[in-house]
């Protein structure tokens, strides 16, 4: 039996699971389910990455020892997945003793091969990235990712002879177009290999970091966190001689976002080459979800919690939306409006209506029993042929990680069935007593719906099973033969009873938070009741406002808007905030340079005259004038106002 292995990145335990983690994990689950439906022997791996500076820092902030902190956050990930109908085969933690042993064994193998050497190195070390940067890689002397000045460290460390393997890696990528996909990332990696890459520093002296896996050949050092983490993909399978490793590794696919392309496309394959392990089969790379055009971040207050979305709109719409909305490989923008639109149009209108109509007609014309089918008319056969082609294409695209296109094809077929209902008009056939055609039309529709429901199991497992149940068929994973579905339109047994109605995807309204609510009648009424008194806010509400001090680094006029200035304000974050302020009439841009201001930092980003503002600078209007709010003593940017 063919095997299939898919992995997600193992997530750092310095943040709780959010939309980005949920997306990758749901994609992995869906693609894994597709292969399960195809009766492949599958293994789906996820887990947590628990060593290194980042985790030590997060644990310290929370007043916990690294292991206790890792236990806590790791269990949040582990427990989140079943709520999203994610069925992983294993959950690995890099603190698992089996993993630790496996990393040491791998290190020994590479060491004995002569591919690890001890050397002195001076370099710019970014603690956020946990890696050294060369002069060339820095941007204006700053880490290109964190925009912070790295610390110059001169220390003795162990290095992996990565550069020895780069020519072979390049050849492999060139000869195997499927190794890294989508194409843009394959090209990006080939571009990286053209750059001057250096050998990889794979140790950290214990004098500055103890939270890691000790090097088996020098107890004064721990392993660099990426060298440790990447090995999870084979340690979880019991490398080198585990049965699971033998069975699943040949079909291994790693799923990652573009942020961690280099470690997966360069470090990992060269490590495997050195250790004499076959390369994985494919790396599949997706883009980033943004929210209101910005990267999700705690300080912007725009981090999307998957469970909030599931509670508001349901799990099937959430999973469907993620797979449908993002073109795999490109960035996509998340918004609740877009989610609700998809839910109402694709699920409630298209699929929901189709199911309700088909079930209602079967009940009306055949007492709820699936009718017999006889020789089809050319019109009916045309629909069947279109369905077989669409479903075949869907399976192909889905297997190729082109989820959005695959679902597009499936939905085009759903649209076709809705039109077929209108065109064949079963109510007329019934009225005119054309029973044979009526039976055929209804069978074509019922079987089409069954096939759609079955093919949706990877996307929305629960709803798929429900719909199949409504069509009188049990879902038994062991008996499904997705690859056999292509050749026939005869899956439903005539005489089987179907449900009276479906109603799986009710329409939903957008659920806004209190502070996002439009001025509705309820609010107006409340306002009129309190018009004569001040509206009071609770202390809890006040605490939600994140007001901090900041320093204006730059101010520019906004073109075409005589009241507005675009400010770049340092509020103690990695990057300055762009904030649009209505101060142009009162201040020349140059006057604001270096001024200390107070910023409302967690105001939802808003586009003003084409410029996105990430916060608000607070000011007091004073007659025609505006006076900036500031402090008397001057503070560090980012100091909280309370
Ligand atoms: N621990 C490393 C991975 C080691 S794998 C051997 C790591 N962890 S992480 O917690 O930062 O997770 C990064 C991954 O989370 C991304 O590659 C992606 O899968 C997912 N995402 C996090 N934020 C995301 C978005 N905003 N959008 C899409 N996916 C994102 O890197």
Image (cartoon, rainbow, N blue to C red):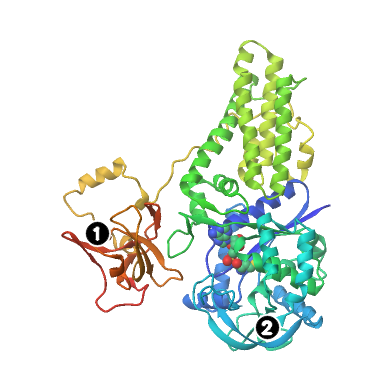
Ligand 1 is found in which quarter of the picture?
bottom right
- Whether residue 642 is visible here, answered yes or no, is no
Residue 523 appears in the figure: yes
Q: Position of residue 433 (x, y in %)?
A: 66, 11
**Residue shown at the point (40%, 63%) measured from the top left:** 578
Is ligand 1 closer than 8 angstroms to the Cβ of mark 2?
Answer: no
Under 8 Å from ligand 1: the CB of mark 1?
no
Q: Is residue 563 left or right of residue 472?
A: left
- Contact flag, marks 2 and 1 (Cβ < 8 Å): no
The local secondary structure at tag 2 comes to strand
Question: Label 2: which residue?
Answer: 214
The percent coordinates of residue 444 (x first, y second) are 70, 26
At which x and y percent is residue 72? 55, 70
Q: Establish if 506 lies above or below 381.
A: below
Q: How would you rate the neighbour count of disc 2 (Cα within 10 Å): few for under 14, some for 14-19, many for 20 or more?
A: many
Q: Quadrant of residue 628?
A: bottom left
Query: Where, quadrant-wise, is the C terminus in this rendering?
Result: bottom left
The residue indicated by pointer 1 is: 585
* SS state under label 1: loop
Looking at the image, is mark 2 or mark 1 earlier in the sequence?
A: 2
In space, the residues marked 2 and 1 are separated at their CA atoms by 62 Å
Q: For this rendering, which residue is in front, 523 or 111?
A: 111
289 sits to left or right of 120:
left
Q: Position of residue 448 (x, y in %)?
A: 68, 31
Q: Nearer the viewer, mark 2 or mark 1?
A: 1
Q: Residue at x 60, y 81 (%)?
A: 211
Other residues around mark 1 within 10 Å, as few (<14) / some (14–19) / many (≥20)? few
């Amino acid at each position: 039996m063919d095997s299939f292995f898919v992995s997600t990145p193992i997530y750092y335990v310095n943040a709780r699971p959010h939309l980005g983690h949920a997306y990758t994990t749901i994609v992995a689950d869906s693609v894994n389910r597709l292969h399960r439906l195809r009766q492949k022997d599958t293994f789906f791996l996820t887990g947590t990455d628990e060593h290194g500076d980042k985790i030590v820092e997060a644990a310290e902030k929370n007043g916990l020892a690294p292991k206790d902190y890792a236990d806590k956050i790791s269990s949040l990930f582990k427990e989140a997945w079943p709520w999203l109908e994610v069925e992983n085969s294993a959950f690995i933690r890099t603190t698992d003793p089996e993993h630790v042993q496996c990393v040491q064994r791998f290190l020994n193998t590479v060491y004995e091969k002569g591919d690890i050497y001890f050397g002195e190195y001076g370099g710019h070390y970014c603690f956020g990235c946990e890696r050294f940067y060369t002069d060339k890689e820095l941007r204006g002397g700053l880490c290109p990712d964190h925009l912070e000045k790295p610390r110059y460290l001169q220390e003795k460390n162990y290095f992996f002879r990565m550069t020895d393997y780069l020519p072979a890696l390049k050849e492999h990528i060139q000869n195997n177009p499927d190794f890294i996909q989508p194409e843009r990332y394959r090209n990006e990696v080939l571009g990286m290999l053209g750059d001057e890459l250096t050998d990889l520093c794979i140790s950290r002296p214990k004098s500055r970091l103890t939270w890691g896996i000790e090097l088996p050949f020098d107890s004064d050092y721990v392993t660099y966190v990426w060298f440790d983490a990447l090995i999870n993909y084979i340690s979880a399978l019991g490398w080198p001689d585990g049965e699971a490793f033998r069975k699943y590794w040949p079909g291994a696919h790693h799923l990652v976002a573009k942020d961690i392309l280099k470690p997966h496309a360069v470090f990992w394959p060269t490590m495997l080459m050195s250790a004499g392990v076959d390369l994985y089969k494919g790396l599949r790379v997706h883009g980033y979800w943004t929210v209101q055009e910005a990267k999700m971040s705690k300080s912007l207050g725009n981090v999307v919690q998957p469970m909030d979305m599931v509670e508001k709109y349901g799990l099937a719409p959430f999973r469907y939306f993620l797979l449908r909305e993002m073109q795999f490989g490109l960035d996509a923008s998340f918004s609740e409006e877009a989610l609700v639109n998809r839910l109402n149009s694709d699920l409630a209108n298209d699929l929901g209506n189709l199911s309700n109509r088909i079930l209602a007609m079967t009940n009306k014309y055949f007492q709820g029993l699936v009718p017999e089918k006889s020789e089809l008319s050319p019109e009916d056969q045309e629909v069947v042929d279109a369905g077989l082609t669409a479903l075949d294409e869907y399976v192909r695209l889905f297997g190729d990680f082109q989820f959005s296109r695959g679902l597009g094809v499936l939905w085009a077929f759903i649209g076709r069935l809705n039109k077929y209902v209108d065109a064949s008009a079963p109510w007329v056939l019934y009225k005119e007593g054309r029973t044979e055609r009526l039976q055929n039309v209804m069978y074509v529709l019922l079987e089409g719906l069954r096939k759609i429901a079955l093919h949706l199991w990877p996307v929305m497992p629960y709803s798929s099973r429900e719909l199949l149940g409504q069509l009188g068929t049990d879902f038994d994973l062991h008996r499904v033969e997705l690859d056999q579905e292509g050749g026939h339109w005869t899956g439903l047994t005539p005489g089987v009873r179907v449900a009276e109605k479906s109603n799986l995807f009710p329409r939903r309204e957008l659920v806004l938070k209190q502070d996002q609510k439009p001025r509705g009648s309820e609010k107006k009424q409340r306002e009129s009741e309190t018009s004569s008194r001040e509206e009071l806010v609770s202390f809890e509400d006040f605490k939600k406002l994140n007001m901090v001090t900041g320093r204006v680094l730059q101010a520019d006029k906004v073109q075409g808007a005589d009241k507005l200035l675009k400010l770049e304000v340092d509020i103690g974050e990695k990057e300055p905030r762009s904030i649009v302020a209505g101060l142009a009439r009162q201040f020349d841009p140059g006057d604001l340079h270096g001024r200390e201001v107070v910023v409302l930092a967690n105001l939802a980003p808003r586009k003003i005259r084409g410029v996105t503002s990430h916060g608000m600078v607070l000011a007091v209007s004073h007659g025609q004038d505006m006076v900036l709010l500031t402090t008397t003593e001057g503070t560090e940017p980012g100091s909280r106002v309370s």
